[in-house]
């Protein structure tokens, strides 16, 4: 299962080392609240506390002696430890309290996989290899991120603003698609977007929409 969502409950992250800190930061950057149970003092977590203190809670515990009574209920949990034997033990401890668990670099223990993702404006893209190769997921993510431009993000914002008009005016999805295509490829619209003149782009877009009439064009 591939999950890339920010849930109502805080995300539980258990582990140690740089991998754990990286997972905590990833969820915080996506807007989630995080409860981190660290097996050792992590300087990186203290730095994150300074930035995300209102959404990050850190507890220091001996992971080997962790028991279900000390684990909060969570929808999503991530475990980042190096020793497989400890990971297997933690799976037994956490499963009664956590709905879905991910284990860094141990795909066979996972209930879901974390995608290598990026966000550019309203555009979000995630890449998963089903846990087979995090390196390839990250490599593909970087290639895709390089191809998604700021103009693409601005086009999404424009079409989002126009969507209520398109839905009310054109019944057929194919017609709405044709109108959207005409809008985003119009040179005058593109020039306004490059200038960050969304209102100007909206005015030109409305003229394009008017030219389509009732959609019979």
Image (cartoon, rainbow, N blue to C red):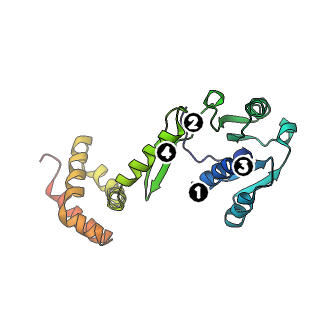
Label 3 residue SS: helix
Name the residue: 60% across, 52% down.
26
Task: Tell me the residue that label 3 is attached to.
Answer: 17
Q: CA distance from mark 1 to mark 4?
A: 17 Å
User: Dots 1 and 2: beta carbons under 8 Å?
Assistant: no
x, y percentage for residue 108?
63, 27
Quick one: label 4 or label 3, which is nearer the N terminus? 3
Q: CA distance from mark 2 to mark 4?
A: 13 Å
Position above or below: 111 against 116: above
User: In this image, 148 relative to 98: left or right?
Assistant: left
Task: Tell me the residue that label 2 is attached to.
Answer: 113
x, y percentage for residue 24?
66, 51
User: Dots 1 and 4: beta carbons under 8 Å?
Assistant: no
Nearest the viewer among 125 and 177 is 125
Name the residue: 73% across, 31% down.
84
User: In this image, 135 relative to 211: left or right?
Assistant: right
Quick one: label 2 or label 4, which is nearer the N terminus? 2
> Which tag is nearer the camera, tag 2 or tag 4?
4
Label 2 residue SS: loop
Task: Tell me the residue that label 1 is attached to.
Answer: 29
Task: Tell me the residue that label 4 is attached to.
Answer: 138
Q: CA distance from mark 1 to mark 3?
A: 19 Å
Q: CA distance from mark 1 to mark 2?
A: 18 Å
- Local packing at callout 1 (Cα closer than 10 Å; few below 14, some 14-19, many 20+) is few
């Amino acid at each position: 299962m591939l999950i890339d969502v920010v849930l109502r409950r805080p995300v539980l992250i258990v582990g140690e080392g740089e991998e754990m800190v990286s997972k905590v930061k990833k969820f915080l950057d996506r807007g989630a609240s995080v409860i981190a149970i660290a097996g050792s003092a992590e300087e990186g977590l203290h730095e994150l506390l300074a930035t995300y203190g209102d959404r990050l809670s850190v507890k220091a515990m001996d992971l080997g002696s962790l028991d279900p009574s000390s684990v909060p209920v969570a929808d999503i949990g991530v475990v980042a430890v190096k020793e497989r034997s400890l990971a297997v033990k933690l799976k037994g401890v956490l499963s009664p309290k956590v709905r879905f668990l991910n284990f860094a670099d141990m795909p066979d223990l996972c209930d879901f996989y974390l995608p290598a993702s990026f966000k550019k404006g309203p555009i979000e893209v995630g890449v998963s290899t089903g846990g087979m190769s995090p390196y390839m997921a990250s490599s593909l993510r970087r290639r895709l991120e390089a191809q998604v431009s700021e103009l693409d993000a601005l086009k999404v914002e424009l079409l989002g603003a126009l969507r209520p008009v398109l839905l009310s005016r054109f019944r057929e999805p194919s017609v709405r698609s044709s109108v959207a295509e005409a809008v985003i490829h119009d040179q005058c619209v593109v020039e306004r977007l490059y200038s960050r003149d969304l209102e100007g782009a909206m005015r030109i877009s409305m003229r394009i929409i008017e030219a389509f009439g009732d959609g019979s064009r």
